[in-house]
Amino acid sequence: MRGCLAVYEREMLILKKKLARQLASMSVGPILYLIAFGLGMGKDVQVHGRPYLEFLIPGLVAMSSMTQAFAIASEINIARFYWRIFEEFQAAPIRNIAYVTGEVLAGITRGLLSIGVILLIALIAGIALSYNLFFWLAVVLNSFVFASLAVCMAMLVRSHADQALLTNFFITPMAFLGGTFFPVDRMPLWVQKVLDFLPLTHAAHAIRGAAYGETPQPFSYLLLAGLGGMLFVLAFYCVSKAKE
């Protein structure tokens, strides 16, 4: 437990040191998307009987919790390749499970922080949604999935540049195709089948349903929890192999 808290505290100290810049960075994307897609394109557009802005905000929440949770991989790689901090973790009496848990919790925290920024922007824009328990559960599970994936990828890549390639090929396409900016059910059937394999699609569906105050469907939550659990175990395995 102490090892987990030590790893988590280190990441939080780094985040605290650049908190102002981080918050500014987290707010730029949502503001641009709201202006370009929400006000510029969808001001008078209705999606499933609701204003497009109400559709967009949960999508931004799903996307931001994914990207910010996955961004913990960059911090891990900086520690590995430039500061050599990971070598100190190898020598320290910290169990692998403690290291993985600490980094995953740090990723989840980053995801939640970014959501706070988006909800503040939504409040200023006058967009009222239901931020209930199921909403936050979906956000946490989504962050858990991609924070666990981030730890896996951070252990497998051989350079910081390789991490950027993974983001460009996997995270960025998912951010735009996972039901964030448009309803998946309006796509051709074969495209829907493909997008159903993306965890962000299920996260966006769960977050949006909860934000609308609807009764959530358990499948999306179970899928995210199961996938997150498998990726967490895989992250533990990757860290163990990296320490050998």
Image (spheres, rainbow, N blue to C red):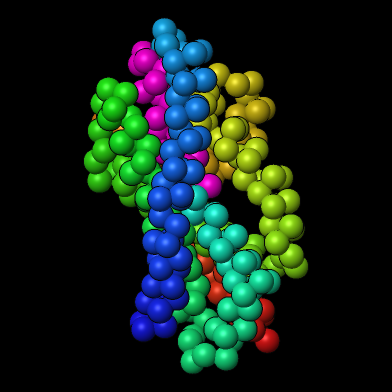
63 and 187: which is toward the camera: 63
78 and 50: which is toward the camera: 78
Q: Residue at x 36, y 82 (%)?
A: 1
Q: Position of residue 190 (x, y in %)?
A: 67, 27
Is residue 77 shown above or below 190? Answer: below
Q: Position of residue 92 (x, y in %)?
A: 52, 90
Residue 34 in sight here: yes
Q: Is residue 64 magenta?
A: yes
- 204 left or right of 241? left
- 62 left or right of 132? right
Residue 54 location, quadrant: top left
Residue 196 location, quadrant: top right
Is residue 3 shown above or below 141? Answer: below
- 82 left or right of 52? right
Tally of numbered discs: 0
Q: Residue at x 63, y 41 (%)?
A: 172
Q: Residue at x 55, y 74 (%)?
A: 236
Residue 191 location, quadrant: top right
Figure quadrant of the C terminus? bottom right
Is residue 148 shown above or below 208? Answer: below
Q: Position of residue 197 (x, y in %)?
A: 60, 42
Q: Is residue 95 magenta?
A: no
Please state the extent of the stretch shown in magenta in the rendering: 48-67
Q: Determine the main secondary structure of the stretch shown in magenta.
A: helix
Residue 208 in sight here: no
Q: Residue at x 66, y 80 (%)?
A: 241
Q: Position of residue 99 (x, y in %)?
A: 49, 77
